[in-house]
Amino acid sequence: MKIGFSTLGCPEWSWQEIIAAAKDLGYDGIELRGIASEMYVPRAHPFTPENIEKTKEMLSQKNLEIPCITSSCYLYKDNTERYLKEGKDYIDIAQKLGSPYIRVLGDRQPYPEGDINHDRVAAMLQELGEYGVQRDVTVLIETNGVYANSKTLFKLMQRLDNDNIGVLWDIHHPYRYMAEDVEQTYNRLKRYIRYVHVKDSIERDGSVEYCLLGQGDVPVKAAISILKSNGYKGYISLEWVRRWYYDLEEPGIVFPHFIDKVKNMIAEV
């Protein structure tokens, strides 16, 4: 298994600081979810047409990968053309960077918000998957919102006829919002899982509070054990949501803690 972190966790850092931290701390890859004030990755300075080749050379020199580019492509929205364009823009930039995956969402929040038009989600996902086939980029839908329910997500995946569509398993959401055992989630979705998000939390007074790995009750180690025993060779990526919650610990604390903790978990299981 490889270890990465999402740039969602370091919104104050420049691209140079992000790359330096990833290299110095021993990470294998950087998941892109905005750089500084620019959330739309294809427009971020390191990935514009005039800069992208230099960026790729820098990553290669430091032996770092971009394993996934995480979009705000909402497949449940009425404005279909806007979000299909965003998804295709992300597939195009992933192809240029040699990144195998982009992430899309079937629901906005980690928890279910309301009714979702599953037909629309399936149709948009199918179109993006077909677009990705031509560019060797796989489209991943996250266990998020209504799709944190693995039964619901499994039904969606069964409707699709495209091996270029997979699942991003956010370990946190099915456990926290659907009370699913991690083994149950994995066994239902294992055919489709290509990438894994990790974060920890506790519930306090009816609210979810994110915390450093190992300080909450999300069974991350159990999930890693399941992945390892099933031969998973992909990424375990820290999604530290500091961009949305500025009261969370700074990346200079969280990123070193995470890689040490998760490496120990991998070794111990």
Image: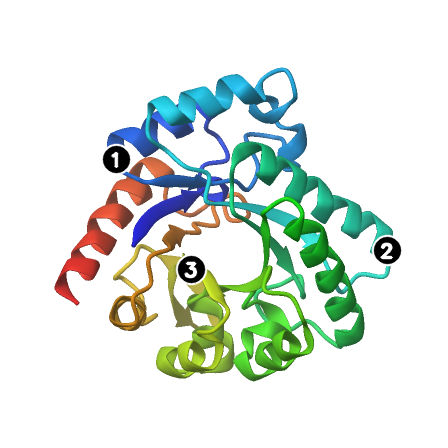
- The amino acid sitting under disc 2 is Asn
Secondary structure under tag 3 reads strand
Q: Quadrant of residue 59?
A: top left
The tag earlier along the polypeptide, 2 or 3, is 2
Secondary structure under tag 1 reads helix
Which residue is painted at 26% across and 66% down in the image? Answer: 228
Secondary structure under tag 2 reads loop
Nearest to viewer (mark 2 / mark 3) = 3
Q: Looking at the rendered structure, which numbered label has been put on residue 196?
A: 3
- Tell me if residue 159 comes above or below residue 228 in the rendering: below
Q: Looking at the rendered structure, which numbered label has been put on residue 79?
A: 2
Nearest to viewer (mark 1 / mark 3) = 3
The x and y percentages for residue 25 are: 25, 35
Is residue 68 visible in the rendered image? The answer is: yes
The tag earlier along the polypeptide, 2 or 1, is 1
Q: Residue furthest left?
A: 268
- The amino acid sitting under disc 3 is Val
Q: Quadrant of residue 78?
A: bottom right
C-alpha gap between disc 2 and disc 1: 41 Å
The C terminus is located in which quarter? bottom left
The residue tagged 1 is: 25
C-alpha gap between disc 2 and disc 3: 28 Å
Pick the front one: 241 or 4:
4
Apparent side of residue 1 relative to residue 131 in the rendered image (left or right): left
The x and y percentages for residue 135 are: 64, 44
- The amino acid sitting under disc 1 is Leu
Circles 2, 1 touching at the beta carbon (< 8 Å): no
C-alpha gap between disc 1 and disc 3: 20 Å
Count how many numbered circles sit on residues in the image: 3
Pick the front one: 264 or 58:
58
The x and y percentages for residue 55 are: 49, 22
Apparent side of residue 119 relative to residue 152 in the rendered image (left or right): right
